[in-house]
Image: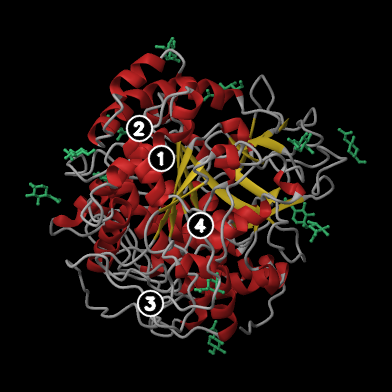
């Protein structure tokens, strides 16, 4: 893409007055004023993820707390997490009892089993859920799985369903598009997918979450409670990001991307500029451990570097911290004080602290920076009225950082001069993070296979677009992400993490391991170290072809709902209609490691399940093509028609962009 060279941000700002000359600043109507009050950024006692940032999107200096924040090394869990886990593990027991009893594990009295071990909760199952990247397709397919696992979804606790698994889980990790899902739920008081879908059953289709009918190029629907028309939307994005730049922070395309995403994912009429990811720690439901712990994943990539699969440092964001277990940094920073000038692990005396850097949209955008490319398509939206100051601002950023770096997110490096001898980034001013899927590990397993977390089973929802386009069935997963995590586990950077053996992608396709659920790592004695059982849940056509191209920017509500419904069917195998043993087998996967730990005999029904669902080591690497058939008879079609055929993108994409995204998703 060719951009007119512009000298820098200052010149973009200088263009502001004339650019704004075209903007009609409207007189707010009483209705708009009322909406503004609703969206007021400082609702002090609103105990959900909250607009805690002192000055909206702009990171702001504040006095440090009396105990000044510090960087810690990664040898243990944080005390915040350890404390929280004591309550969370207890809180999972009652939902887990309900769930397991519904899953009908003949030969094991699961109520008695849990009661007998409840004084030593670490003997009992510790569940993680991981939702892959893949843009809106991944958000929607992942949402179907989460809805299936959520006892708040209507009918989800009927026979054949899996409701309650979410309530039984300790961790919920998301990456890129999966991170949009996780971030959106947690920014909204851990609302349910059901509640989000229920919002627009009425005639008022405005102002709610997940309105994907308008792409990010258009901005939010201008319904009754929306403040912004298209120009107002762009002006808001521009003003907020510019203010961060004016405050002295380096800007990247991720700043714009994160702000734009927030209008769809954060339930606020103004895109929630002051919402921070660290505010989740004060959310009542989370802090009382009535939700799983959310984790988002991103990769480190220094400027000018090419990211090599297996060699990237994998970072996580959780409500308390940003950091990594990898030996190449091996440190965690307090999320709330990101942006503060840390040096050798502490804030130099005399320096103040910074708050508001961890804007929740920016964190979600950091996990999904590949979609910065999406935003750069703005120049090609000829049918839309996109103000020139937006294009100028994006061009200016690219001029500053270089077009090869259009996918980075810039963080002042909190790990500066920390772990000098071992950290790759000890001498870098900036910590530059990119999309968590750029190292091909598109499922956020990394945080969940850390031995410190003792996870027993991971429900790994894979919405990757691995199968090539064009071919009969593009944009379905074929195991590539699991292969990447397995191969990395054999390298020194894995630092004590272990992962089950995973076969090559042709084997996945030839044996159908990517068109039905498969367990990996069933036999713990066969492993080089402590590893969970992986319950692989690959997106596949059950009731709908949800294999939208990663670049499709907008979706009708019908498409969205059908994709979510398909995801529900993937997770439940059509509510147990494809295999009536499936719910029982899910229960067996949950209990597997725990039964080993407590020396309990595996019930016969579970042995049958493990024979049926565990990959048994068979390999068939012969060349192959993926041609899936619907798993259910009851299928849905939407007006977009046969999206399983090479999907027509809503706008022209350059060869280079298609290539860069196809390789990664
Ligand atoms: C997290 O841990 C720190 C240090 O132990 C403590 O000061 C802080 O209050 C904790 N935060 C929460 C939300 O528990
Ligand atoms: C968890 O449950 C155990 C056993 O009932 C109890 O001893 C412990 O105090 C509980 N811990 C928390 C943090 O609630
Ligand atoms: C429970 O599983 C047994 C087989 O182990 C089966 O005979 C029975 O019908 C199942 N019950 C329900 C309610 O599905
Ligand atoms: C829930 O189950 C009831 C009774 O079986 C059925 O009528 C209804 O359609 C189901 N609702 C959903 C959302 O599946
Ligand atoms: C958050 O959700 C909880 C549980 O559903 C509810 O009791 C509470 O009122 C909600 N809080 C807000 C601020 O919406
Ligand atoms: C979004 O916010 C509106 C207004 O505060 C609220 O009525 C609605 O329940 C919220 N939606 C969700 C899914 O939380
Ligand atoms: C901006 O980026 C430059 C070059 O990477 C770096 O030296 C500088 O510290 C950054 N400034 C801030 C405020 O992060
Ligand atoms: C891994 O990345 C580091 C820098 O991040 C680089 O110095 C090193 O050569 C890379 N190793 C391999 C095997 O690519
Ligand atoms: C790390 O190295 C820098 C520069 O050499 C030095 O100033 C700093 O004190 C070192 N940090 C530690 C903790 O030794
Ligand atoms: C599997 O996916 C990779 C990309 O991740 C692709 O290169 C390969 O051709 C695919 N193989 C099959 C059999 O689908
Ligand atoms: C955008 O359009 C220009 C022509 O206006 C074209 O040269 C360019 O390749 C397009 N960019 C992309 C990413 O499609
Ligand atoms: C188990 C293991 O190898 N842990 C190492 C991970 O990396 C850190 C930092 O290099 C080492 O201190 C640990 O021993």
**Mark with earlier residue (1, 3):** 1
For the N terminus, give its image quadrant: bottom right
Find disc 1 in the rendering and name its residue.
Answer: 589
Q: What is the C-alpha distance between the residues marked 2 and 4? A: 39 Å
Find disc 3 in the rendering and name its residue.
Answer: 627
Q: What is the C-alpha distance between the residues marked 3 and 2? A: 36 Å
Residue 618, image x, y percentages: 52, 60
Q: How is the image coloured?
A: secondary structure
Q: Residues within 10 Å of mark 3 (few under 14, many from 20)?
A: few
Q: What is the C-alpha distance between the residues marked 1 and 2? A: 12 Å
Left or right of 300, for residue 273: left
Between tags 2 and 4, which lies in front? 2
Task: Write the residue at 20% across / 39% down.
Answer: 157
Find disc 2 in the rendering and name its residue.
Answer: 603
Q: What is the C-alpha distance between the residues marked 1 and 3? A: 28 Å
Between tags 1 and 2, which lies in front? 2
Helix, strand or loop at mark 2 = loop
**Mark with earlier residue (2, 4):** 4
Residue 513, image x, y percentages: 44, 61
Task: Write the residue at 31% across / 67% down.
Answer: 541
Helix, strand or loop at mark 3 = loop
Helix, strand or loop at mark 1 = helix
């Amino acid at each position: 893409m060719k951009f007119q060279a512009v000298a820098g941000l200052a010149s973009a700002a200088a263009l502001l007055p004339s650019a704004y000359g075209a903007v009609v600043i409207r007189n707010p109507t009483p209705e708009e004023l009322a909406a503004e009050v609703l969206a007021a950024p400082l609702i002090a006692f609103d105990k959900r993820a909250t607009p805690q940032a002192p000055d909206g999107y702009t990171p702001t200096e504040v006095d440090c707390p009396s105990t000044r924040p510090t960087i810690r090394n990664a040898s243990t869990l944080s005390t915040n997490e350890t404390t929280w886990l004591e309550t969370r593990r207890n809180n999972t027991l009652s939902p887990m009892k309900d769930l397991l009893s519904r899953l009908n594990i003949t030969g094991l009295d699961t109520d008695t089993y849990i009661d007998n071990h409840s004084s030593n909760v670490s003997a009992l199952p510790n569940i993680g859920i991981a939702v892959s990247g893949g843009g809106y397709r991944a958000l929607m397919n992942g949402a179907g799985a989460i809805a299936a696992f959520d006892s708040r979804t209507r009918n989800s606790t009927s026979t054949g369903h899996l409701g309650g698994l979410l309530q039984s889980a300790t961790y919920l990790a998301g990456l890129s598009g999966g991170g949009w899902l996780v971030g959106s739920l947690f920014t909204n008081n851990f609302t349910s997918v059901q509640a989000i879908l229920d919002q627009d059953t009425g005639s008022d289709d405005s102002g709610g979450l997940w309105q994907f009918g308008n792409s990010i190029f258009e901005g939010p629907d201008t319904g009754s409670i929306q403040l912004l028309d298209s120009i107002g939307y762009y002006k808001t994005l521009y003003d907020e990001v510019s203010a961060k730049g004016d405050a002295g922070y380096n800007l990247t395309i991720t700043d714009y991307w994160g702000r734009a995403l927030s209008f769809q994912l954060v339930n606020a009429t103004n895109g929630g500029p002051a919402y921070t990811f660290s505010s989740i720690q004060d959310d009542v439901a989370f802090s009382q451990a009535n939700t799983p712990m959310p984790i988002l994943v991103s990769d480190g990539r220094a400027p000018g570097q090419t990211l090599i699969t297996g060699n990237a440092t994998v970072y996580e964001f959780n409500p308390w911290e940003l950091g990594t277990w990898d030996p190449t940094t091996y440190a965690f920073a307090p999320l709330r004080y990101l942006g503060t000038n840390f040096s050798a692990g502490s804030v130099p005396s005399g320096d103040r602290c910074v708050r508001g850097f961890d804007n929740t949209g920016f964190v979600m955008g950091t996990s999904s920076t590949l979609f910065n490319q999406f935003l750069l398509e703005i120049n090609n939206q000829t049918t839309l009225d996109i103000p020139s100051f937006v294009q100028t601002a994006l061009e200016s950023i690219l001029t500053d950082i270089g077009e090869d770096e259009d996918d980075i997110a810039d963080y002042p490096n909190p790990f500066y001069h920390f772990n000098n001898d071992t950290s790759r980034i000890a001498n870098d001013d900036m910590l530059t993070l990119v999309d968590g899927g750029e190292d091909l590990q598109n499922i956020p397993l990394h945080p969940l296979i850390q031995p410190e977390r003792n996870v027993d089973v991971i429900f790994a929802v894979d919405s990757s677009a691995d199968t090539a386009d064009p071919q009969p069935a593009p944009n379905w997963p074929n195991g590539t992400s699991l292969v990447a995590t397995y191969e990395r586990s054999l390298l020194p950077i894995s630092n004590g993490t272990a992962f089950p053996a995973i076969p090559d992608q042709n084997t996945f396709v030839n044996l159908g391991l990517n068109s039905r659920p498969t367990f990996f790592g069933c036999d713990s004695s066969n492993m080089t170290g402590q590893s969970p059982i992986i319950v692989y849940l690959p997106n596949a056509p059950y009731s709908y072809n949800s294999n939208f191209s990663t670049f499709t920017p907008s979706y009708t509500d019908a498409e969205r709902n059908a994709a979510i419904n398909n995801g529900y069917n993937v997770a439940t195998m059509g509510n147990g209609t494809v295999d009536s043993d499936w719910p029982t087998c899910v229960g067996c996967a949950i209990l597997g490691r725990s039964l080993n730990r407590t020396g309990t005999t595996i019930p016969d029904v579970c042995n049958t399940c493990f024979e049926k669902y565990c990959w048994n080591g068979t390999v068939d690497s012969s060349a192959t093509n993926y041609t899936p058939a619907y798993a259910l008879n009851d299928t849905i079609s939407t007006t977009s028609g046969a999206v399983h055929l090479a999907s027509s993108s809503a706008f022209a994409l350059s060869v280079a962009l298609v290539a860069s995204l196809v390789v990664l998703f």
